[in-house]
Image (cartoon, rainbow, N blue to C red):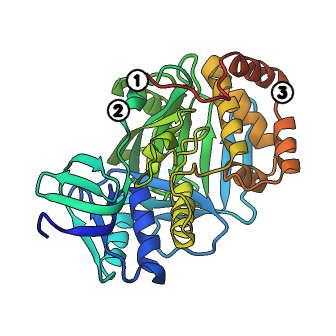
Amino acid sequence: MNSSTTYDYAIIGFGAAGANLALQMAADAFFASKSILIIDENLSLPITKKWSFWSTAQETAFPIIKTWRKANFISTEVNKEIDLEDYHYRTVDANAFRAFALNQVKKHKYAKVEACEVLHVNEEPNAVEILTNKEKITAAHVFDSRVTAEFNHYIDGIKLLQHFKGIVIETESPTFDADAFTMMDFRKPHEDTCSFMYVLPFTESKVLFEFTFFSHTIVSDQVYDGAITAYLNEYFPATKFTIVETEQGVIPMTDYRFHQHNTNRITKIGTAGGWVKPSTGYSFNNSQKYAKEIVNRIKKGERLSKKLGTKEGAIYDTVFLEVLNHSNAFGQTLFTQMYTRNHIATIFRFLDEETTFCEELKIMASFDSTPFLKSILRLVKRNVFGYPKSR
């Protein structure tokens, strides 16, 4: 490429959001003659992440590590095994997914992939200029996965974090039930926080143990490591194992309106676009769904700056987050009520914002009402259902 190269579309960042969007474009005949540029400075670096999601699809086009049809939910009150009904819970290795997506995108005649750093993006009336450490590029429309600096200074609303550290262990002999994963185990939380163990058994001897918080601040590595060690000692005593992988991450759980940074020619995607489900931290499902929606909007000539997701879903998320924001340790009770008083298929549809109003009322009725009513009153007092400002 040279400094005068112009593209129809540029995608900055090739994580889950950028890769899913590129896949949707590359597979659609509408984009067969469109030029597409993917920019990611970290393409040569391994991604130490695994992405999990639920779906009713029997198969996926991309490689997965493991599929489960049963889940466990454990708290100090219950130990429940859940049949996932029509759903499959799947985990994909981020490296494998990126390699699959790159392979598919490279089949597109006019697609280019560049490993370079984006230094500056400037929107002009008729195009967007992208300055990288290699050259200057122009594109008719840019999809940008970089989180804006304004979010770092957001103080007027809810700003919780899903933060975690996990280890993948291999045992000397078969030890685990590989047919069911553990969605949440609240039996050994950290102090007065919403914290739990997440367990993915890939085989009877290879398992991910991930200690996760939905809280205000991150903790030291020693806290995560101590929690995992204590859990293994308590529930899998005398088990000999080797740590083969580690992963760590921080995901925002917030009512921040990321879509306010969308413009006529720049659309924020991924975390930067509000694609992370605020109340759960899950994003892979949304990355697939929202990528399809963006492609459909392009084909119909619709405005791309409009917020993705439902207004009702945003309200439910905000109310739920406010409960955790005000009484963080109450999270165990909230999730216990959710997973023991509702069918899992209804929960998944609710989290995917695909339920009917009657189903949503039933979900709401499954919770004790007092914390939510207090949450709503606090939100109304702060005018959170208007448009919070960042400063």
- Residue in view at x 41 percent, y 76 percent: 26
Q: Secondary structure at mark 1?
A: loop
Q: Nearer the viewer, residue 238 or 8?
A: 8
Q: Are marks 3 and 2 in contact (CB under 8 Å)?
A: no
Which residue matches tag 3? Answer: 368
Q: Are marks 2 and 1 in contact (CB under 8 Å)?
A: yes
Q: Residue furthest front?
A: 125
Which residue matches tag 1? Answer: 153
Camera-side mark, 3 or 2: 2
Which residue matches tag 2? Answer: 149
Name which residue type carries label 3.
Asp
- Residue 76 at least partly seen: no
> Residue 250 occupies which quadrant of the picture?
top left
For label 1, the crowd category at 10 Å Cα-Cα, with few meaning under 14, some 14 to 19 and many 20 or more, is few
- Residue in view at x 25 percent, y 61 percent: 138
Q: Secondary structure at mark 2?
A: helix
Name which residue type carries label 2.
Ala
347 to 59, vertically: above or below: above
Q: Position of residue 282 (x, y in %)?
A: 55, 47
> Residue 53 occupies which quadrant of the picture?
bottom right
- Residue in view at x 33 percent, y 81 percent: 108
Name which residue type carries label 1.
His
Query: In this rendering, would 337 be left or right of 169?
Result: right
For label 2, the crowd category at 10 Å Cα-Cα, with few meaning under 14, some 14 to 19 and many 20 or more, is few
